[in-house]
Image (cartoon, helix red, strand yellow):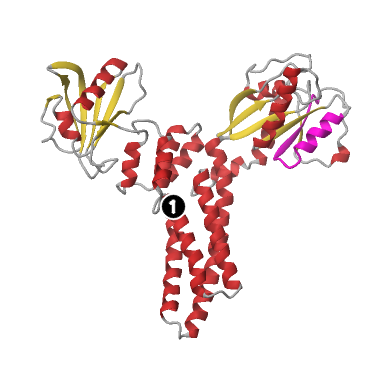
Amino acid sequence: MNDTIVAISTALGVGAISIVRLSGNDAIEIVNNCFKGKDLTKVASHTINYGHIMDNKEIIDEVLVSVMKSPKTYTTEDVVEINCHGGIISTKRILETMLTHGARLAEPGEFTKRAFLNGRIDLVESEAVMDIIDSKSEEANKLALSQLSGTTSKMIKKFRETLKQLLASIEVNIDYPEYHDIEVVTKNQVKTSIKDMKIELDKVIKESKNLTLIKEGIKTVIVGRPNVGKSSILNKLLEQDKAIVTDIAGTTRDIVEGEIYLDGVLLNIIDTAGIHSTDDIVEKIGVEKSLSMIDDADLVIVVLNNNENLTKEDEEILEKTKDKQRIIVINKNDLDKKLDISSKKLENVVETNTNTVEGIKRLKEKIIELFQLETIKTKDYTYLTNARQISLAKKAYQSLKEAEEGLLNDLPIDMVEIDLKETFDLLGEIIGETYREEILDHLFANFCVGK
């Protein structure tokens, strides 16, 4: 990291301003060599300086240059940001000029990677940076901001501090094996601490799964046989005519998607082709797609027709979705009731119709109730927010469990120590106290260039 990197940090295109950012030991010197105005090497840190970027005595653009000197910067290195007029030509020419004068084009996420490697932020906070950029709802943004503020990292560090103290106690036991009373006290202390940590870590993992819904949205699939009103429900939820609606069965042959927000949480809604037996090749492909979508869904909305008797196809759909988080929608409740599901003992059943404004309201209320969206919104956001973090937490929990089983089986305390050390290291991977280069490369490769 001895070189100086540069990248365009704003979206490339027509706009009011663009920002070209540099970070590294030579950032100020490189810009100063192309700048007509004050001597940037002599200006105070965190100042904005007016002038022009030059290339072979030709003015490229009128600019404002922000100079931020190490260590109080995003990367802890010298950082310079060139604010120029928005537009593709001038922005690219300024970038090319910086490259010509010794800077290197930054890789995706390299500014944030340097902030991590230089100790300014940890790995959880690094991931939160991209989550803020990608957040699609107010609640997702709050979650990312909480991560960035360090609340989750403090929680993980608290776990590790407890483990550190346990490991220190075990080391004392190992150093003085002749004192049996020390071993008894140590084992009792470790048992109690492991039990408490397991309860707390298990709670964190379970709550984190729910909070990922805030970040990623609830993948919602609408399924049912043809002509039960799936597309009409989709259109009503989205408040637009997204899907074609006719009285002809099988109108929807492929998936139709849309997004809505319920209590600040994103619902990714997918209307599927009607599930039924068919010899039509195109319809058959649509049915197969519909069935495959069920497996990946967070929520399945099963639509039945209030005006028709329960069919064999309805029963097959109910059987297929019985282990999924689902809502059973009895649609067309404004028509004569012919459907009888009293013998099925189904949960989360709501009646709807798509002819009135109020017709779909109960379905929305049931979704909010089922996913406890009101409760999620009022929780503090000190939780893990992605698959990497949750996976490591699960492994750490398993190591704690193995340590506990070792104590119950009266294994030597130094054997138990191995599992506790593994737990300590796994929790360290979450915040980046320990890490592998290939993991970092993969993580930051998903960032945008210039961040």
Q: Is residue 219 above or below residue 383?
A: above
Side of 75 where 423 appears, left or right: right
Q: Is residue 57 left or right of residue 324?
A: left
Identify the residue at horizontal 88%, vertical 33% (top origin): 340
Name the residue nearer the viewer: 2 or 272: 2
* Quadrant position of residue 397: bottom right
Q: Amino acid at mark 1?
A: Glu
Is 316 part of what is drawn in magenta? yes
Residue 374 drawn at (x, y percent): 60, 41
- Number of labelled discs? 1
The image quarter containing residue 271 is top right
The question of residue 97 being in magenta is answered with: no
Q: Using residue 434 as the reference point, say whether residue 403 is left or right of it.
A: right
Query: Which quadrant is home to the N terminus?
Result: top left
Residue linked to disc 1: 429
The location of residue 199, given as percent across then percent down, is: 57, 60
Q: Position of residue 179 (x, y in %)?
A: 46, 85
Residue 451 horizontal/vertical position (percent): 35, 34
Q: Is residue 83 above or below residue 42?
A: above
Q: Secondary structure at mark 1?
A: helix
Q: Residue at x 42, y 74 (%)?
A: 171
In front of the other: 393 or 227:
393
**Can residue 246 be seen from the camera position used here?**
yes
Q: Residues within 10 Å of mark 1 (few under 14, many from 20)?
A: many
Look at the image and tell me whether residue 297 can be seen.
no
What segment is highlighted magenta in the picture?
A: 311-333
Q: Which quarter of the figure has residue 231?
A: top right
The residue depicted at 71 percent of the width and 37 percent of the height is 326
